[in-house]
Amino acid sequence: MTTTAPHHGPPCSAATCHRGLRDDELAAGQTLCSPCVHVIGVWLTAELPRQIIVLEGSRQRETTGASTGGRTAYRTAPLPGRDDVLNLLGPTAWSDGIRDPYGQAHADQHGAIPITGVLIPWARTICDERRWNPPATLTAQALGAWLARTAVLEYASRRPWAGNFRDELHELMRTIRAVTRLRPQRRPIPQPCPRCDSLTMIETDHQLYIDCTTCESMFTRDELALAARITAATLNTDAA
Ligand SMILES: [Zn+2]
Ligand SMILES: [Zn+2]
């Protein structure tokens, strides 16, 4: 049972988000809710650089060999995910970045797309629409930092394709985490989800918002405190 919906506006345009847009978000012309904008920034600036270090380290081990003794054993049994690592770190040309931002560009190609192959089409879409200069370098780190710039994220959050942007980055982060087996530190929150009632709420490093891993809703701490008070009030009424 849903005890309270945090907001009642039109839905956030991300398929993986269930929030309604607040008045201040609508007034700013956002199609993507502020928690989604925030989490994109966390992925691109806090998590992605760390994940790339792990991927680079993994590629390094596999290319040079960790030791000379016993190498033949490793030759015949490469580390799992080797192709995934190489694919993720592969280069992409700026000219390969033309895409329809409303289309599902990578829907059936997961695992084969480099990180830059996901980031460049978005950077290029934004540069083309705004007539901005492309980022100076086209590494995954530089592209992530560029896409997470305040002006870029503010612009993206108002576009009709903003939900696709968020959903694709979400899928990219899931793909990377599956390869590195490195996930942001998460801690359970002992409170039922205000939307789906599951006891599967978690808080994650660097993120302002609490996620429900069952229905993927996001909540601020204030919203959870409010939901807890409403639940308590409802229980008291039921008991009376
Ligand atoms: Zn959202
Ligand atoms: Zn939930």
Image: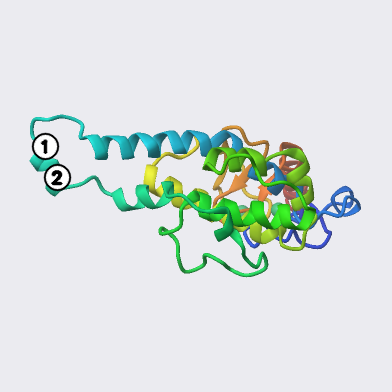
Q: Position of residue 47 (x, y in %)?
A: 54, 37
Task: Find disc 2 in the rendering and name its residue.
Answer: 75
Q: Are marks 1 and 2 in contact (CB under 8 Å)?
A: yes
Can you tell me whether the CB of the residue at mark 2 lies under 8 Å from the nearest atom of ligand 1? no
Which is more toward the observer, 141 or 111? Answer: 141
Task: Find disc 1 in the rendering and name its residue.
Answer: 71
Left or right, 83 with reference to 168: left
Q: Is residue 30 above or below residue 161?
A: above
Q: Considering the image in quadrants, where does the N terminus appear? A: bottom right
Camera sees residue 113: yes
Camera sees residue 20: no
Query: Dot 2: what SS?
Result: helix
Q: Residue at x 69, y 59 (%)?
A: 163
Q: Residue at x 71, y 62 (%)?
A: 161
For the rendered model, the colour scheme is: rainbow
| Crowd class of label 1 (few under 14; some 14 to 19; many from 20; radius 10 Å) | few
- Name the kind of residue labelled 1 in the image: Arg
Q: Position of residue 74 (x, y in %)?
A: 14, 42
Q: Residue at x 78, y 42 (%)?
A: 151
Which is more toward the observer, 137 or 57? Answer: 137
